[in-house]
Image (cartoon, rainbow, N blue to C red):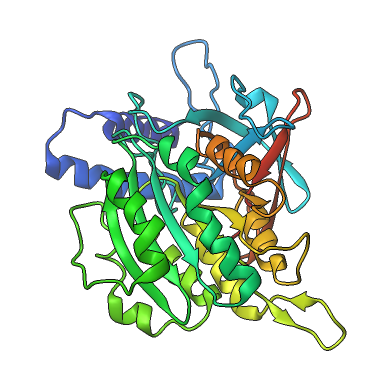
Amino acid sequence: MRNTKILVLLVFFVVDNSWSESHQIMSHRFVGLISTIGLACPVLVVALGPQQQRFVERVDVARILIDVRVVDDFGRPVLGLTANDFEVEIDGKPVRVESADWIDGKASQDVPLASTELSGVAEAATAGRSIVFLVQKSHEPSRAMGLLRWPQVNEPLLAGLTSDDRVAVVSFDFHLKMWLDFTHDIARARTIMARDVMLRDPPSIDPGPKPSLLAQLSRDEGRRTYTIEKALQLLANALAQLPGSKTIVLVGYGFGRMSSQGGAFLMPEYEMARDALQAARVTLLCLDVTFADYHTLELGLQAVAADTGGIFERLYLNPRQAVDRVVNALVGHYVLLAEKPDAKPGLHRIAVGLPRAKGIVLARSSYVD
């Protein structure tokens, strides 16, 4: 009983928020002590009052954030879902979904989520979305034709942005080039994508105000980046320094390596890009510009869209419909807070289902612990 009383005193010591900073520092030390005791004892019994009531003190359980888009057959977002509508499995085992919050770029009045040792955990308190337009350029005829067509069909996408949104523009041909740091100037982004990216070389630009993409990504780093997979990894590492979820709209023709038997395969460097994108909470919305019903390198676009919870669309077949689906994907998404199982470090598979509602679920495929 003496040990039980000591633990009760420690708990009240920790939760007293009115104490001075020095006392708060001491309380952190007591938290570590309590956690150590809790790990040694699965159940902690606390005696209160003459009736000897029992309460269970649980050890903190690690959580994971999962950005999820749910759309109907036409690509429109499905709204009004709650945590009870989702089920999550990690490595094939079900885990509890504690909450499901809808994030749509508007200013949030909610208290930010507590830290879970993941980068970009708390949603930004300010309004607006963080969107990077990545244009993958090529002079190959079937790709160049699609790129020239892109400025003619992208207006619905740009028209759906607001002055609260933060937009950056980069391109990749032989290396990664920076055109525009995060800005609220949508008209400027429109001009760069419609004319400058296609016909000119980028000027030298300085990092803008926070949140800044270029503050984390130098022009020299971009010049040393020779593959689109490495460019995606570099962008992911830069975006990981910014809070909340981010989106890359990739307008391009894909990636991968041709095999001697025909078809294509993904290089090992793609796995590093995928892991970095997932850790940074970046979703890829991919628009294939190639003038073809099907081509081999679309494999890369399909893979990165599936692995990050995004979408893949072809501009060749129905460009307006393809752009509309990207517009709908940008409307908003759910953020699930789920328990993270105690497992060995490494790659862990994520599966998100919707057993009690209708919709197509788009979520990242894995995480690295």
Please give the count of numbered marks on the rendered protein: 0
Please state the horizontal and vertical placement of residue 223, each as a whole percent of the image: 36, 83
- For the question of whether residue 365 can be seen, the reply is no
Where 346 sits versus 209, above or below?
below
Please state the horizontal and vertical placement of residue 347, each as a whole percent of the image: 65, 64
Please state the horizontal and vertical placement of residue 209, each as a whole percent of the image: 18, 53
Horizontal arrangement in the rendering, residue 153 relative to residue 270 (left or right): left
Horizontal arrangement in the rendering, residue 253 relative to residue 199 (left or right): right
Residue farthest along the top direction in this orientation: 51
Which picture quadrant has residue 298?
Answer: bottom right
Residue farthest along the bottom direction in this orientation: 260
Please name whichever residue, 39 or 310, is drawn nearer the observer in this view of the structure.
310
Please name whichever residue, 349 or 251, is drawn nearer the observer in this view of the structure.
251
Q: Quadrant of the C terminus?
A: bottom right
Please name whichever residue, 231 or 327, is drawn nearer the observer in this view of the structure.
327
Residue at image point 62% right, 49% down: 309
Residue at image point 61% right, 23% down: 82
Residue farthest along the right direction in this orientation: 261
Please state the horizontal and vertical placement of residue 39, each as a whole percent of the image: 53, 49
- For the question of whether residue 222 can be seen, the reply is yes
Please name whichever residue, 280 or 115, is drawn nearer the observer in this view of the structure.
280
Where 40 sits versus 273, above or below?
above
Residue at image point 45% right, 63% down: 236
Where 3 sits versus 274, above or below?
above
Residue at image point 30% right, 34% down: 125
Where 154 sits versus 280, above or below?
above
Horizontal arrangement in the rendering, residue 43 relative to residue 208 (left or right): right
